[in-house]
Image (cartoon, grey):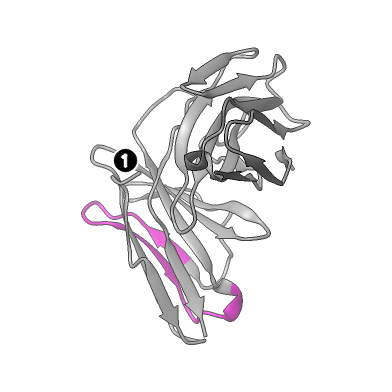
Amino acid sequence: TQLLEQSPQFLSIQEGENLTVYCNSSSVFSSLQWYRQEPGEGPVLLVTVVTGGEVKKLKRLTFQFGDARKDSSLHITAAQPGDTGLYLCAGSPLAGNNRKLIWGLGTSLAVNP
Amino acid sequence: NAGVMQNPRHLVRRRGQEARLRCSPMKGHSHVYWYRQLPEEGLKFMVYLQKENIIDESGMPKERFSAEFPKEGPSILRIQQVVRGDSAAYFCASSPLSEGVNTEAFFGQGTRLTVV
């Protein structure tokens, strides 16, 4: 069974701090996606990474896909209260139905003003 | 994700009743996915459908649950004879037809089912 482990599970920081959250697996994925979910809402896609070693930037968010395509990280610079939410990673498996995303449990981020 | 419409947003059912959850995909999207989310378990894949076809239902319980995506109209997730354990948030996602590995799915706001 392919699993995605996210860490830390909870993170509470002050506005302006930097942070990194991780998404790890022992399995290789064809692609990996990061979503943000707010309470009472559905996940919103932030980015998809496909190539091993790939780095993508989205304003203050930097996403990296591991060289072996087994892990990924999300770094937020100068966090703001609006960044508060549940950050989820989801991977497309190499074999079988690549549309059947495998999900981590998420990192719940709270940015305090 | 505003393009994927789910209704109702909240649904309360008594044990033994039927629950029908609807999902209209984004315009131009021909693939629909249903997921269930529980606080301690995260999002779990249930079923993947294209128009008039079930492609993968490996995540769906064998009994009481069914899904369809007719040629016309929304996708329906149907739960018969609901039990308290069915209480969860059910999310629908859609994606366009694509042969690539980028399975970018766009989610609706979910239906929160409460069984009393």
Instruction: Label 1, secondary structure: give it.
Output: loop
Residue occupying image coordinates x 47% and y 32%: A46
**In the image as oriented, which residue stretches furthest toward the left?**
B72
Left or right position of B86 against B71: right
Left or right position of B1 against A102: left
Left or right position of A88 against A23: left
Amino acid type, residue under disc 1 in the picture: Ser
Q: Is residue A72 above or below residue B56?
A: above
Q: Position of residue A38 (x, y in %)?
A: 48, 50
Residue occupying image coordinates x 64% and y 20%: A65
Q: Is residue B68 magenta?
A: yes
Left or right position of A107 against B28: right
Quarter that holds the N terminus of chain A: top right
Q: Position of residue B42 (x, y in %)?
A: 62, 53
Q: Which residue is mark 1?
A: B30
Q: Quadrant of residue A109?
A: top right
**In the image as oriented, which residue stretches furthest toward the front?**
A113
Q: Is residue B79 above or below residue B33?
A: below
Residue occupying image coordinates x 47% and y 60%: B90
Q: Position of residue B25 (x, y in %)?
A: 30, 47
Quarter that holds the C terminus of chain A: top right
Which chain is home to disc 1?
B
Please tell me how crowded label 1 is: few (under 14), some (14-19), or many (20+) other residues with Cα within 10 Å: some
Residue occupying image coordinates x 60% and y 34%: A91
Q: Quadrant of residue A40?
A: bottom left
Q: Is residue B62 above or below residue B58?
A: below
Q: Quadrant of residue A111?
A: top right
Q: Is residue B114 magenta?
A: no
Front-lying residue, A85 or A43: A85
In the rendered structure, which segment of residues is drawn in magenta? Answer: B66-85
Residue A24 seen in the figure: yes
